[in-house]
Amino acid sequence: MASSDTQTPGEHPETPFYDLDHYLAIPRVSGLALSPDGGRLVTTVATLNDKGTEYRTALWELDPEGKKQARRITRSAKGEAGAVFAADGSLYFTSARPDPESPEAEPVNALWVLPSDGGEARVALSRAGGVGSLLAAKEADALFLTASVLAGSTDEDNDEERRKDRKDNKVAAILHSGYPVRYWDSDLGPAQPRLFAVEPGAEPEPGKPATVDAVPPVTLRNLTPDAGNGLREAETVVSPDGKTLYSSFTKPLANADSRTVLVAVDVATGTRRTLLDTEGMNYFPGPVSPDGRTLAVLSETDTTPEQAPQIRLHLLDVTGGDSGGGADGGARLTPLAPEWDRWPHPAAWLPDSSALLVTADEDGASPVFRISVPGTDGGDSAPVRLTADAAAYTDVAVAPDGRTAYALRSSYEFPAEAVRIDVASGDVTRLPAPAERPAYRGTLERVETTSATGDRVPAYLALPEGASAGNPAPLLLWIHGGPLGSWNAWTWRWNPWLLVARGYAVLLPDPALSTGYGQDHIQRGWGEWGKAPFLDLMAITDAVEQRPDIDETRTAAMGGSFGGYMANWVAGHTDRFKAIVTHASLWALDQFGPTTDSAQYWLKEMTAGMAAENSPHLHVENIRTPMLVIHGDKDYRVPIGEGLRLWYELLSKSQLPADENGETDHRFLYFPDENHWILQPQHAKVWYGVVEHFLAKNLLDKDLLPVPDGLGL
């Protein structure tokens, strides 16, 4: 197998990684939509606005054959996203840009359409609450969307009136009767998500003249008016004939708990039927087979204090009959590749319904695999790795002929880019993109060691140009979040090449709890965060520090979310590092568990005993290392209380001495209007600037960089 590219890392003479403004201006690609005939391919590209204050998105068309250059097909200050091709080839998307036909209307995120035969985009439908994601059937004139409705609204007009009343009277209060009330960075309610069918609207009155360019009106039909908050985190797919929607559905349980069941929504009647509902199990739909007979299904077990989740892939016969409510769906739920010890993500079917393409984390990558559907004799089919490179693939789509697939691919060598995959050979070809790959200076290596318990600890190591025995580089240990995840794809928020450009080596390990190495690798860290994961991190750091091109006397540890938790744990259990950066981090587990936005998940693992044994705050008196604490006030996953308590206890209890003004070498970078992630471009610039200054001061003993202006220090 091979990968064909027109540019190799580092060959471009310019690099953006020495300049944050240049880095922030790199175009960012996301999402991929393939037309039903396979002739058009569309992606979304985010670029920095002229003021450098926010990203705006646009749709770009790529040549599936790879012969023509990419071209931009939408343009507006508000941007466009969510591209979906309808069966007739029309391209639908969402945008909050003003409607040229109604310039006086208040802009909302509306449904727009670009006709398949050309012409300008026009508004297909607009509503007061805006529209969300889009779905289209592949073989029928059927379009669907998600949109929010104020709980209790009787129809669209009533919903608009009630929204206006809340706005005019400046009412922001929300009354809840269930859990949760927040999610990541959003307050939940009073609006609730619904599934709508987009259908033809009322015809003009008989005899009423129509303009030459009049277009048929469309309207929305609410398919799930009684869904409550069940669709809040729903994943939804549509059958090829457009007659059925399959969706995950959050079922509330006693004691503020919930589980995810699988439902089918009949489009004609709006009838919702539960297909799979099993105690201790959660179900999520994958794509429907082209023949409409089979639904790919993921199952995920509830966790316990002793048992990590297990994710399995199944096939569900949806041809009819009672599906039942048990774990086997009335004996029609068939395991697919049951012996495969990875966590699969079903992506796309081959056109003849003979095989499913899936992605899964795999040893520092996330390749595309092909899994053949077992025959009627019940035989099993093992996954076959299709893409051989050390890259992560997403947004997989298969051409109608079944010989070609398209996807977005990224790695630590390049950000997301569109590629064409030969399904037979696995050969991968990069398609002409809106922008060339950013070029970095340095090298990327795969390294590993063995922990004290004999377990493998793999990692990536990014080295600066010129690192050698005569010029060893200071080392930054970066700890990933999750914790159920892996360092395997490009990240804009934690990008190692920015620090490599400053002369640091960056170590990116996958310790216990990381995905892509089998269930045992996850399980051995479950419920014992401060044990195996910590020991793995120290083991790989020890091994890398033995290299002649690494300066073991100048090291720092950094992490965000769970990685921030681990950075806090490291701070209380070793003074080997000269600086520690902890972003959006868990500090006091007995406080975090009940206050996070998803307590019902975390507290299944985080018992009182687990919290007492693994909480970093209980070791604050041992901390002697300068720490940079970073937190956003709108972070609901790791609430700001974690950062505030960490900051106070660092200053009041840690072993770092204070000066005559009561100040220590600890620092707290606070973002009042950011959440779990730092999303605003100028704030990202501040984040990197402060981190670079903090590291330079503590590792290099020099004020190499000024603290960004306007921070109050």
Image (cartoon, rainbow, N blue to C red):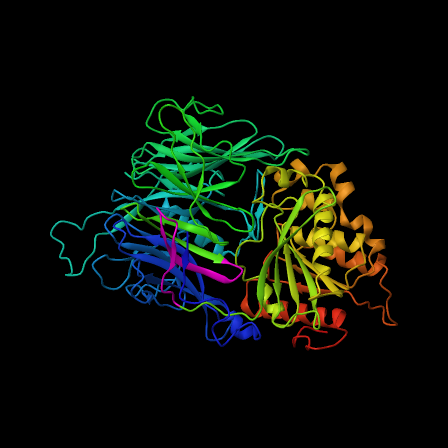
Q: Is residue 309 above or below residue 705?
A: above
Residue 488 shows in this picture:
yes
Total numbered badges shown on the rendered structure: 0
Q: Residue furthest right?
A: 660
| Residue 429: percent from left, percent from top | 37, 58
Q: Nearer the viewer, residue 667 or 445?
A: 445
Q: Is residue 693 above or below residue 639?
A: below
Residue at left offset 65%, top offset 36%: 604
* Residue 414 on the magenta span: yes
Q: Nearer the viewer, residue 637 or 453?
A: 453
Q: Nearer the viewer, residue 196 or 39?
A: 39
| Residue 246: percent from left, percent from top | 39, 36
The segment highlighted magenta reads: 411-434
The quarter holding residue 264 reads: top left
Q: Is residue 708 left or right of residue 620?
A: left
| Residue 15: percent from left, percent from top | 52, 74
Residue at left offset 25%, top offset 42%: 140
| Residue 595: percent from left, percent from top | 67, 45
Q: Nearer the viewer, residue 199 or 499?
A: 499
Residue at left offset 49%, top offset 43%: 233
The quarter holding residue 213 reads: bottom left
Residue 109 shows in this picture:
no
* Residue 145 on the magenta span: no
Q: Quadrant of the C terminus?
A: bottom right
